[in-house]
Image (cartoon, grey):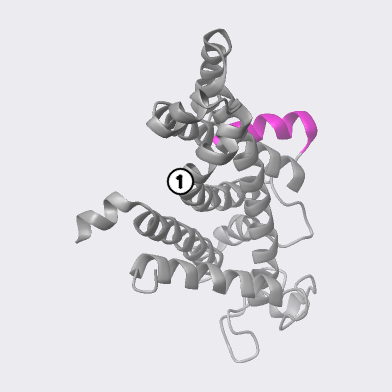
Amino acid sequence: MMWNRNLLIGASLVGFNVLVAMLSLVWTPYDPLEIEPALSLTRPSTAHLLGTDENGRDILSNLIVGSRATLITGVMAVVICMVVGVTVGIATSVSPRWIESPAIFGIDIVLALPTVLFAIVLAAVYGPSTITAIFAIGIALSASVAQVTRREVNVLLTSDYVTAARASGSSTRRVIRRHILPNIRASLFVQASGACAVAILAESTLSYLGLGTTPPAPSWGRMMASLQQFLLIDPIFPLWPGLAIVITVLGFNLLGDGLREVLDPTLRESKH
């Protein structure tokens, strides 16, 4: 693990973002909500390292605080999608055929709906909020987790050790706990890392559309939406929140690739 480049870079980027989010709880260069009209759209300087937005608010302070909302939304959405997806995937695999077929059909329906579109529908019903975004992203991502989990569990259910466990009188619950979950654990880690990258990107998109984190709490997506109108004046203004989103998503993607390379024995053997 220490010599895996993707894992090291991904873990470093993710760790940096987590540290920044934790730092926002105790310190920021300026009050992110303090408005100074006289300092509107100032370029980076020693006083404001990344400049100020149209209301004179410090961009760096807003980025630091915005990382907290983005990461919390992404992590909570991943928790929901993993719990729902793994539960549905395993339950579908061990259920009778008359239950499995409708469940697979339901998974396919959710997979056909884009995450952002699903969140827009929920926002239209319940109103835009962070909670709505978390549940929308979590439920939308759970379908892909359920599909992958179901396929892996189906393969494991035909293995010799599962057949032997059933022949010895082990219940379905015991087989799942002792044989299924330990053997799909590596896949679940990889899926969670990839889902976190997608969730953060989806949260930024929803905030950009005004359906995510509600004002006045800073959000990278809403910063992009407010600063893009000044792109022709100076393209550096919308650069900072966009760069923060790219770095965070890249970190989780590299972390997922690194975990897959480390935990998948077939990939390790192919490299040797």
Horizontal and vertical percent position of residue 98: 56, 7
Residue 162 within the segment the image draws in magenta: no
* 187 in relation to 36, above or below: above
Residue reaching furthest to the front: 168
Residue reaching furthest to the bottom: 46
Horizontal and vertical percent position of residue 193: 51, 53
Which SS does the magenta portion mostly show? Answer: helix
Image quarter in which the C terminus is found: bottom left
Q: Residue at x 55, y 63 (%)?
A: 230
Q: Residue at x 75, y 73 (%)?
A: 32
Q: Would you name the residue on which mark 1 appears?
A: 187
Image quarter in which the N terminus is found: bottom left
Mark 1 falls on what kind of element? Answer: helix
Q: Residue at x 72, y 74 (%)?
A: 24
* Residue 116 appears in the rendering: no
**Magenta part of the chain:** 115-127
Horizontal and vertical percent position of residue 91: 59, 25
Between 234 and 67, the one lying in front of the other is 67
* 38 in relation to 156, above or below: below
Label 1 is placed on what type of residue? Ser
* 251 in relation to 31, above or below: above
Between 191 and 29, the one lying in front of the other is 191
* Residue 152 appears in the rendering: yes
Between 172 and 18, the one lying in front of the other is 172
Q: Is residue 57 left or right of residue 162?
A: right
